[in-house]
């Protein structure tokens, strides 16, 4: 029996004669749409910045101030240098979460490939920041835990046993971070969309409304959770690196 697959929303034409075009997965198309929306908002917000801000400017500035305040409260005054990274992740995740509430559209973050990609970006970014602060060797030292602070006689005796153990524990701990970020965001957004769709088929236009309100709240919370964890990871990399450097 022939299986008919649901067609993707977008297809890239193939200019080689005789070969079919390539379908773009829906979550990739939706991610492009989010990028276009954010680009349009950035243009409209920055086009006419004045002393008397317009409503759109007020909203965007408030969101940026929340991200900046979070960075400065966790990392300190120098945390604002990481605002482009944290802000970009925060805005993309928030709009991706909310996109699925529009009929006919899907949340990119309801696909585990999108959340995994965001988690990898976060993982690589905070390690890069730690390496940039004091160098690769100094940043690598905090993977060995408190072993480096032991007295030399005890380090000579216990080092061969403790160093591999602490290193393995730290590596597992760091690798679990992107896995946790990926599953948490994907599970929440995918579950919300599935419940809303189920309720829509049972009781159209009535039952999904309370769940959609809850979904908006959860979308904001999940964005703040991701931003908070990213900020904590950056703070840990910077503080650990500076501690080892001193």
Image (tube, rainbow, N blue to C red):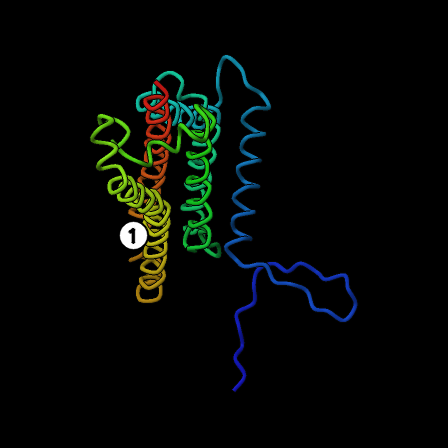
Residue 24 is left or right of residue 169, and the answer is right
Q: Residue at x 53, y 73 (%)?
A: 5
Q: Quadrant of residue 25?
A: bottom right
Determine the residue positioned at 31% across, 62% down: 199
Rendering coords of residue 122 (x, y %): 42, 39
Residue 85 picture location, percent across and down:
47, 31
Above-or-below relation of 185 to 61: below
Q: Quadrant of residue 87?
A: top left
Closer to us: 111 or 220: 111
Residue 164 position in % (x across, y down): 30, 43
Residue farthest toward the top in the current orientation of the protein: 51
- In percent of the image, x 35 and y 50: which residue is there? 179
* Quadrant the C terminus occupies: top left
Residue position for label 1: 211
Q: Position of residue 189 (x, y in %)?
A: 36, 52
Give the left or right position of residue 110, taking residue 160 as reference: right
């Amino acid at each position: 029996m022939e299986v008919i697959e649901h067609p993707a929303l977008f297809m890239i034409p193939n200019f080689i004669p005789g070969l079919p075009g390539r379908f773009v997965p829906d979550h990739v198309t939706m991610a492009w749409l989010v990028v276009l929306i954010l680009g349009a908002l950035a243009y409209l917000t920055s086009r006419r910045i004045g002393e008397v801000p317009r409503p759109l400017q007020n909203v965007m500035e408030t969101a940026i101030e929340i991200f900046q305040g979070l960075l400065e409260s966790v990392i300190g005054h120098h945390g604002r240098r990481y605002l482009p990274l944290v802000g970009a992740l925060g805005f993309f995740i928030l709009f991706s979460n909310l996109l699925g509430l529009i009929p006919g559209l899907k949340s990119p973050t309801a696909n585990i490939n999108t959340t995994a990609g965001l988690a990898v970006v976060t993982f690589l970014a905070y390690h890069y920041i730690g390496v940039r602060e004091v160098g690769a060797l100094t940043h690598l030292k905090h993977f060995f835990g408190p072993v480096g602070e032991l007295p030399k006689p005890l380090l000579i005796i216990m080092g061969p046993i403790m160093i591999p153990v602490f290193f393995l524990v730290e590596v597992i701990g760091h690798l679990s971070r992107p896995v946790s970020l990926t599953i948490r965001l994907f599970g929440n957004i995918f579950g919300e969309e599935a419940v809303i769709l189920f309720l829509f088929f049972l009781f159209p236009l009535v039952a999904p409304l309370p769940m959609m309100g809850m979904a908006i709240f959860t979308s904001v919370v999940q964005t703040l959770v991701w931003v908070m964890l990213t900020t904590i990871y950056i703070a840990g990399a910077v503080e650990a690196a500076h501690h080892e450097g001193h």
